Image (spheres, rainbow, N blue to C red):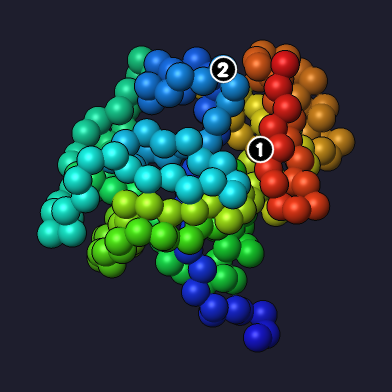
Amino acid sequence: MGEYDYTPVNVKKLVLVTPRLAREEYGLAVDRPVFTADCDSQSLIYEVGKTVRVEGFFDPLDTGSVHDQKRIDKNISAMNSHPRVGIVYHQQPRWILDRWGQKEVASWVAVVEPTGTVIAKEDYFFEFNRITDELNVKEIRCFCAGCRSGPLKDGKAVNVYGNGFLFAVCNSDIHDKENGKHPEWFSPKVTFEIAENGEFLLKSD
């Protein structure tokens, strides 16, 4: 279909968080890094091949947003906007997904398929334009936070700011030299790879 493929694809921005942040900030009882999202109405864990759903009543007429302020560290806070009940995602042309690393700062993006009720919603802040109560994770793609290359087949996940959010970094010599100067970025030490079947494999110490 040429350089720009306009086939619709459902995508969702994710964050990869350390076990400590997952427990303290998101209330997830885990002992390994996990993918979750900041803008869902409930904290969920996203894994390839798994279906996630929100608990409680999903009211199709209740599409209002709740605004709250989340503390990132002692000096920085961010305003979050999320639906009252639901899982949020984008429907975009595939070419945007293929060039995600050139367009987004975020390292991690999931290709998802809604399997529940769907509400299309105009979102002027471009955080999302679809809400559902259930979706399936088809694949997770990652892009280097350093040079924006990707999608990556393998690499490292580094805790650059020490706040528990892990960013993908490709295995380039330039990044390896920089990483070597900051051993504190690797706590916990996490590497990842994409298996032949598309499964996202995380390995951590």
Disc 1 crowd rating (10 Å Cα; few below 14, some 14-19, many 20+) is many
Residue 172, above or below 111: above
Q: Which residue is mark 1?
A: 168
- The structure residue drawn at horizontal position 63% and vertical position 64%, both measured from the top left corner, is 98
Q: Which residue is mark 2?
A: 31
Query: Percent position (x, y) of residue 153?
Result: 77, 48
Q: CA distance from mark 1 to mark 2?
A: 20 Å
Corner quadrant of residue 72: top left
Query: Percent position (x, y) of residue 18?
Result: 55, 22
Three-letter code, disc 2 = Asp
Three-letter code, disc 1 = Ala
Query: Percent position (x, y) of residue 30?
Result: 51, 20
Figure quadrant of the N terminus:
bottom right
Which element carries disc 1, helix, strand or loop? strand
Residue 144, above or below 119: above
Residue 42, above or below 198: above
Q: Residue furthest bottom?
A: 1
Which element carries disc 2, helix, strand or loop? loop
- The structure residue drawn at horizontal position 43% and vertical position 66%, both measured from the top left corner, is 91
Figure quadrant of the C terminus:
top right
In contact (CB < 8 Å): disc 1 and disc 2: no
